Image (cartoon, grey):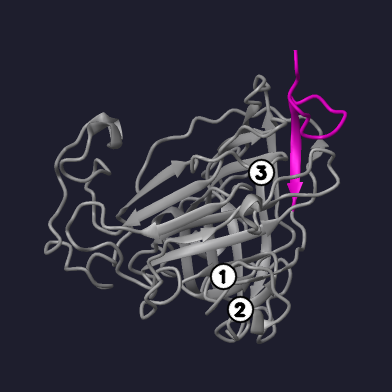
């Protein structure tokens, strides 16, 4: 009987693995005037948009372009292998205690939250995270620090079928309108709602203050619909699609020299918090897309900057990072382990009242070295359903 390809050559599939970040080629960023996400040599290849031809990894949010940390790593465990021919192996990303003291953001642990952290930011983070992003420098607004902390256990799949049979493209569509406590809009099927019950409890757009940044955009409420697959099989190779709940924190660091972010910097009491976002990132090596859409027919889908800028006609999307089969940057790891993968994540974020940009879209493209086997870890995770996704 045919067998599934190993994730690491010569190693059994049930194992604990690590994906370590790497540097990659230059690609046009989300805000490029032309050739978005295409290979480039200079800004001229991106429609002459200043700074748009950038080496991977990078992240964009509301049009701001941020070089991402190359020190990213994700440790995950495959307990039981999938079966041929699908060869889809479920993974677990550990967390430990999700409400442990968060050493990277002590400014969010001050009583009464005088620094304005988002509610989840005051509740700690994982003390044994499988997903790690060291503090990194963001060259905007005179120089900022940013970091990402894991706030719950994660999961996902690795697909090692050969030839590839999986379909791991991820699409996320977001609507800023408040869906109520059931996290679904009035009249939608109960299967789309928390606890499989539609409470028909949506507040009116008028009650939300209208479709503007100080109305529907001034909260963390909204709905994101996630779809897996685009109807076409993925490019041959080993694909990773991993889901990790994260808290992204960006601030002006008082201890770093002006215009810099010293390695290991933390967000401390009294420092200026620029943004704090809750992300349910789902990087995939197959390709990712996202958009703001009006899901309940009230005429309101976004109240904020979107993927590029509020004034840009393309800011609602769809924004699509193609996979290897379409010439895009996302790609699988080679079966022989000589070439690492490149993962893409696209999603919407309702960043809330403390953020001046309100509803935004983010895009992250991250290259990885080939997966390595590391000492075994036990891991179990039950993902709790929640809103907005």
176 with respect to 319 (left or right): left
Residue under label 3, please give it: 235
Residue 129 location (% of width, % of height):
64, 44
Q: Quadrant of residue 316?
A: bottom left
Eyeballing the image, is 333 above or below 360? Answer: above
Dot label at residue 209: none
Determine whether the residue tagged by mark 1 lies in a helix, strand or loop: loop
What residue appears at the point 54 percent right and 62 percent down from the top-left corner?
363
Span of residues in magenta: 1-20
Prevailing secondary structure of the magenta residues: loop
Q: Are the residues flagged by discs 2 and 1 in contact, CB closer than 8 Å?
A: yes
Residue 303 location (% of width, % of height):
29, 69
Residue 191 location (% of width, % of height):
28, 31
Taking depth in this image into account, of 239 and 119 the one nearest to the observer is 239
Eyeballing the image, is 76 above or below 262? Answer: above
Report the residue that reaches farthest toward the top: 1
73 with respect to 8 (left or right): left
* N-terminal label among 3 and 2: 2
* N-terminal label among 3 and 1: 1
338 with respect to 201 (left or right): right
Residue under label 1, please give it: 36
Q: Mark 1 Cα within 10 Å, few/some/many (few <14, many 20+)?
A: many
Residue 99 location (% of width, % of height):
51, 44
Dot label at residue 46: 2
Gap between marks 3 and 1 measured at Cα: 21 Å
* N-terminal label among 2 and 1: 1
Determine whether the residue tagged by mark 2 lies in a helix, strand or loop: helix
Q: Is residue 11 magenta?
A: yes
């Amino acid at each position: 009987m045919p067998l599934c390809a190993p994730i690491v050559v010569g190693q059994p599939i049930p194992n604990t693995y690590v994906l370590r970040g790497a540097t990659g080629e230059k690609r046009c960023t989300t805000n490029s005037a032309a050739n978005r996400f295409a290979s480039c040599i200079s800004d001229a290849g991106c429609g002459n948009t200043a700074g748009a031809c950038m080496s991977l990894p990078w992240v964009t949010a509301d049009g701001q372009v941020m070089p991402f940390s190359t020190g990213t790593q994700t440790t995950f465990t495959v307990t039981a292998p999938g079966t041929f021919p699908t060869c889809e192996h479920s993974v677990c990303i550990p967390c430990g205690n999700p409400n442990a003291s968060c050493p990277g953001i002590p400014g969010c642990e001050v009583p009464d939250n005088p620094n304005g952290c988002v509610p989840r930011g005051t509740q700690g983070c994982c003390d044994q995270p499988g997903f790690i992003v060291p503090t990194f420098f963001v060259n905007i607004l005179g120089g900022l620090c940013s970091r990402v902390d894991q706030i719950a256990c994660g999961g996902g799949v690795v697909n090692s079928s050969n030839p590839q049979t999986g379909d791991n493209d991820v699409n996320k569509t977001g609507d800023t309108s408040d869906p109520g406590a059931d996290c679904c809009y009035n009249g939608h099927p109960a299967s789309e709602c928390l606890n499989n019950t539609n409470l028909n409890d949506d507040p009116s757009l008028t009650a939300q203050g209208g479709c503007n940044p100080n109305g529907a955009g001034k909260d963390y409420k909204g709905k994101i619909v996630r779809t897996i697959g685009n109807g076409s099989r993925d490019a041959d190779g080993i694909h990773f699609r991993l889901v990790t709940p994260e808290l992204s924190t960006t601030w002006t660091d008082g201890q770093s020299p002006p215009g810099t972010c010293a390695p290991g910097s933390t967000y401390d009491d009294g420092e200026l918090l620029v943004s704090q976002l809750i992300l349910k990132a789902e990087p995939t090596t197959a390709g990712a897309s996202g958009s703001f859409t009006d899901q309940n027919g009230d005429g309101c889908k976004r109240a904020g900057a979107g993927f590029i800028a509020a004034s840009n006609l393309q800011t609602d999307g769809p924004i699509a990072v193609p996979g290897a089969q379409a010439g895009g940057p996302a790609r699988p790891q080679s079966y022989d382990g000589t070439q690492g993968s490149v993962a893409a994540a696209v999603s919407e974020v309702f960043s809330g009242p403390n953020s001046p940009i309100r509803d935004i879209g983010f895009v992250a493209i991250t290259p990885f070295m080939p997966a390595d086997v590391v000492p075994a870890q036990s891991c179990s995770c039950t993902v709790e359903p929640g809103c907005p996704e």
